[in-house]
Image: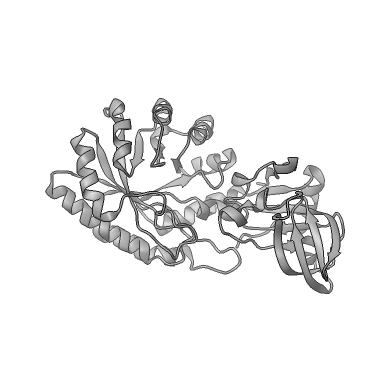
Amino acid sequence: MQHLPDPARIRALAAEHGTPLLLLSTQTVRSQYRQLRQSLPGVHLHYALKPLPHPEVVKALMAEDGYFDLATNGEVDVVRACGVDPARCIQTHPIKRDGDIRYCLEYGCRTFVFDNPAELPKFLPYKDQVELLMRLSFRNKEAQCDLSMKFGVQPQDGLALLKQAVGMGLTVRGLSFHAGSQLLNNFKYVEAIGFCRQLFNLAALDGIRLDTLDIGGGFPVGYIEPVMPINYYCHPIAGELERLFPSVRLLAEPGRFVSAPSMTLVASVMGKSERQGRMWYYLDDGLYGSYSGKLYDHCDYPFMPLKKLEGHGGAERLSVVAGPTCDSIDVVYQDISLPELECGDLVVSPMMGAYTSASATDFNFFPRAKIVTID
């Protein structure tokens, strides 16, 4: 779990900037990236901007000689404004408009992903400029988010699609897959890597020489419950890559693992009320804001009053924590044990770097949390 800033500093930053406030540690971003790089030697880690497309995150990873995974024109804008070399980027959205392809090529990024026949004609006007990866689908019910439900060609159909793309004169460099987000079991990676080796071999028999494998993202982080240390988690994955793909360009697309521990949310109690035997506390942030990941990412986050961290908690009782909007769905925690809180008290949630601010809204005109870099 993310290390919290000192409570006194949290109070000082809240007083200076107001709440809700997201405290961003770029040192944590760099540390997470280094850990994963050490755990997957020889793999180019393309940070997926989707969970936290913040310029300071991009700049921190540029300082680590990092690579980047883009999916939209807006993400192209972020990396371009930061001065990222387009040769260090890939565009991995399997479904694109013509304008998306042109926008990315104008930036200088040439690697794209496809997963179905309808995408192939879109690349024909640019076939001398683009190189492609074919995304495979490996369904995974164990993943927090099964990212092969919406994208990827079925493995048994992969060779035919690959031959179709090459037959149209397109340059296909390799394969990609995503084993699933927040995946606690690493066996799916091993299984997918093994199948990709078989497809590489079958393609070679048809004269198609592939030289790139992208193993996607999904590497887990511990929110409330601990997860396997990343070096242990990646050990069998790295072993299979070394054994089966010794001379292939290897890519990965970590997003959550890099960004999740990098931000801490600081919110304030706007009001309180006793309802049906429970104390209700209303925060200035909620499901439509930084806690949006509870809906969209199927995720939960640690939650604690700041005064409890300072050793002033007192007796606790079952409580409800609600967001600020006038929508009844905007309830963040039901039946959570909390000490008595007062209006103006600060609460904190660590591990708020992934799929929080990125999916927050200004619904009901409650502004989303301000992001402040603390190192």
Count of picture labels: 0
Q: How is the image coloured?
A: one colour
Q: Is residue 246 visible?
A: no
> Observer-nearest residue: 56 or 192?
192
Q: Between 29 and 154, which is closer to the camera in this rendering?
A: 154
Left or right, residue 101 beside residue 5: left
Q: Which residue is at the front of the view, 78 or 177?
A: 177
Percent position of residue 332, x then y: 70, 59
Residue 97 appears at what percent x and percent y?
Answer: 41, 32
Quadrant where the N terminus sits is bottom right
Residue drawn at x 36%, y 66% is 187
- Please report the residue visible at 18 percent of the width from the left and 48 percent of the height from the top: 203
Q: Tell me: residue 62, above or below residue 81.
A: below
Residue 115 is drawn in which quadrant?
top left
Report x, y in % for residue 193.
Answer: 30, 58
Residue 146, quarter of the rendered image: bottom left
The residue shown at (52%, 53%) is: 256
102 above or below 368?
above
Q: Is residue 349 visible?
A: yes
